[in-house]
Amino acid sequence: MIQPTYITWILIIFGAITFLPLMYAQLVMLLQPHSQKARDLLIGKGEDWRDKTHFKSAYAFAWADWLFLIPLFVSGNIGVLLGQWWGYVIWTALGAISIYFSIIFWVMEKEYTYPSCGPLAYYTYYWGFFLYWGVAAVVYSVLRITGVMF
């Protein structure tokens, strides 16, 4: 059994701050894909999809997030809170996915998102938090699984 530490709780809270707004935005995208609310949440107030591919990729990411990312987040948190090694393995997988998508969105979306939200919002919530949480989750989980105590 791997007892949760203060760092575990910090990662859970930081993960909730990072993933809960995404869960809400993606749920709106799934339930009301052509609504102004979905566009406002995902691409900015008053903005419109650049083309059909932009809309379709946002819709596909919403499905992928609800089918894979969110169940991993919830089950990983449950596992680490229970002190189970499998929770840390799930966190490692979710952290790797989060890093992966951060790289993709850095390339695909930075030129559009960064100018509309500015550096503070971009390097925190819109892009940075997912990368920062992913790196922290992977490093922390690997260390905990290998027996490093905090």
Image (cartoon, rainbow, N blue to C red):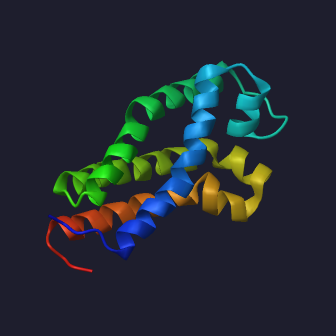
Q: Can see residue 53?
A: no
Left or right for 37, reference 61: right
Residue at 73%, 27% (x, y): give it: 49
Vertical arrangement, residue 101 with respect to residue 123, above or below: above
Where residue 150 sits in the image (x, y, percent)? 27, 80
Left or right for 82, reference 62: left
Q: Which of the two residues, 23 or 130, is positioned nearer the viewer here?
A: 23
Where residue 75 sits in the image (x, y, percent)? 32, 44
Where residue 96 sits in the image (x, y, percent)? 34, 51
Vertical arrangement, residue 75 with respect to residue 114, above or below: above
User: On the image, which quarter does residue 12 sit in?
Assistant: bottom left
Tell which residue pokes out farthest to the right in this image: 46
Q: Can see residue 45?
A: yes
Count of numbered marks: 0
Q: Which of the two residues, 18 or 110, is positioned nearer the viewer here?
A: 18
Vertical arrangement, residue 86 with respect to residue 59, above or below: below
Residue at 46%, 45% (x, y): give it: 101
Vertical arrangement, residue 39 with respect to residue 117, above or below: above
Residue at 66%, 21% (x, y): give it: 33
Q: Quadrant of the N terminus?
A: bottom left
Where residue 142 sits in the image (x, y, percent)? 23, 64
